[in-house]
Amino acid sequence: MTAFSVPGEGPDGAEARYAELAGIAGAEVAPPTDRVRSVRFAHGAEEWTATVGQALSGQLAARTDRRPGRRGPASAPGRRVADTATVQAIFDTGEAYVVVTNGPPVGEVDDSTWDNPFSIRRPTVRHVDRFDG
């Protein structure tokens, strides 16, 4: 488990910044025991991870083709995918997880392929980690 933090903020400013990011996400400020640190989720043929303080990253799922006349599947290895945006906070809204990055209007990163904030529907979520309460 990891202690709660907000990128670029010390312990004294983290709570205020978290509340500000909650407003941008349209989410409630979660109590310390419910704050999300990381979410792994499927997005098309890719599996992505959003972790507070880290750039979004993922992997294209390995492809398996069954070819005629072959006994077993032929597999292609997965490949890494990455984005320039760094996760600032993740909020659990009950219906989805909302990720706020350092893209506009929060920060200066303007070449991210993700909207900011963006939602992750619950059926696509593979794993969730929370901060220490």
Image: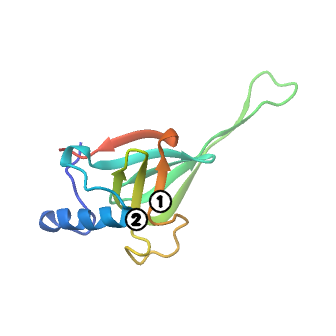
Crowding near the residue tagged with mark 2, few <14, some 14–19, many ≥20 C-alpha atoms within 10 Å = many
Please name whichever residue, 100 or 80, is drawn nearer the observer in this view of the structure: 100
Furthest residue to the right?
69
C-alpha distance separating marks 1 and 2: 9 Å
Horizontal and vertical percent position of residue 121: 50, 46
- Is residue 74 left or right of 54 when viewed as pictured? right
Residue at point 41%, 78% (across, down)? 108
- Is residue 65 left or right of 17 when viewed as pictured? right
**Residue marked by disc 1:** 118
Crowding near the residue tagged with mark 1, few <14, some 14–19, many ≥20 C-alpha atoms within 10 Å = some
Mark closest to the chain's N terminus, 1 or 2 = 2
Image height of 123 relative to 79, above or below: above
Q: Amino acid at mark 1?
A: Phe
Disc 1 on helix, strand or loop? strand
Q: State the mark number for residue 101.
A: 2
Are the residues flagged by discs 1 and 2 in contact, CB closer than 8 Å? yes
Residue at point 25%, 56% (across, down)? 29
Q: Quadrant of the C terminus?
A: top left
Furthest residue to the left?
12
- Is residue 86 left or right of 61 when viewed as pictured? left
